[in-house]
Image: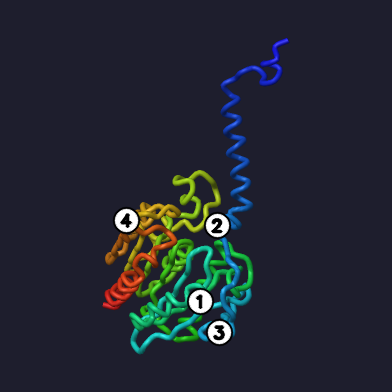
Amino acid sequence: MNWKRALFGTWSWKRPIISLVSIYLALSVIVLFFADRLIFQPPPSSYSLSEVGFKTITTDGGTLASFIIDAEPGQPTLLWSHGNAEDIGQLRSRLQMINKQTGYGILAYDYPGYGASEGSPSESTCHQSIQAAYLYLTEQKKIPADKIILVGQSVGSGPTCWLAGQKQTAGVVLISPFLSAFRTVTRVPLFLGDRFENLIEIKKSSSPLLVIHGDKDKVIPFEHGKKLYQLSPSQEKTFVQIEGAGHNDLFFKDSFKIAQLIGSFSKRSER
């Protein structure tokens, strides 16, 4: 008896192809149904809504938690979409520092499922959240669009690029952005159902653009930020490389410089 043939069957050139297709289909199913769980990593809430500066904004999906600092007279307001695995409570000191240094107002919000925000995080609920925050600024706070600067860091570059394609604002700041969520892992488009396709959305915005990226980023490749900068049709755009900075230590490397960059960019966008 041929035990090798009994165990492994007769060789055919079709077998490796069938195996690869089967593996791809299995991975596609996993990606399709579990992508949001892999992309979004909300930490335990680090704040209470009773603390100074925190408030809720009502949305179609429920309560949206936000941290708000009013702008000094005549200064613009930053609409801040934060990175993954953090919430607005962890951002508080950073945002206060930027406000103190520039005088700009700030509205930072938590995605659904983060901090005190209700709901579950997904691409669509993040879009709803940034839209609600924008409407709060324009309709409740009466801040004109040309006094709003969109800031998105890491996963926050997704809703930021999306809103930038919908609204003309004073400017867009992308910090450690990705081309798309899946491309941070696959580098090339392998699966259907990709999330936050910034490489498409960035082409819809002509607002002034500032891209900041650390050249030692191991989470989102440095080339992603550079490529988004190149794809942007904006006539006023700047790319800044933070030398020696990775993904999670960007502000620790040079928070003062980043605040200065945002400040100087804001002044340029007002011209």
* Local secondary structure at mark 4: helix
Q: Which residue is mark 2?
A: 39
Query: Relative to 50, does residue 31 appear above or below in the rendering?
Result: above
Give me the disc on residue 230.
4
**Mark 3 or mark 1, earlier in chain:** 3
Q: Is 152 on the left-hand or right-hand side of 4?
A: left
Q: Is 113 on the left-hand or right-hand side of 175?
A: right
Q: Which residue is mark 1?
A: 133
- Tell me the residue at 48%/68% (across/down): 82
Name, please, the residue furthest toward the right: 1
Q: CA distance from mark 4 to mark 1?
A: 28 Å
Q: Nearer the viewer, mark 3 or mark 1?
A: 3
Q: Amino acid at mark 2?
A: Ile
**Mark 4 or mark 3, earlier in chain:** 3
Q: Amino acid at mark 3?
A: Glu
* Local secondary structure at mark 3: loop
**Mark 2 or mark 3, earlier in chain:** 2
The percent position of residue 13, horizontal first and vertical second, equals 56, 21
**Mark 1 or mark 2, earlier in chain:** 2
Query: Relative to 53, does residue 184 appear above or below in the rendering?
Result: above
**Mark 2 or mark 4, earlier in chain:** 2
Residue 83 visible in this rendered orientation of the protein: yes
Q: Nearer the viewer, residue 41 or 76?
A: 41
Q: Is 263 on the left-hand or right-hand side of 5?
A: left
Q: Nearer the viewer, residue 77 or 54?
A: 54
Query: Relative to 149, does residue 222 appear above or below in the rendering?
Result: above
Q: Amino acid at mark 1?
A: Ala
* Local secondary structure at mark 2: helix
Q: CA distance from mark 3 to mark 1?
A: 19 Å
Residue 174 visible in this rendered orientation of the protein: no
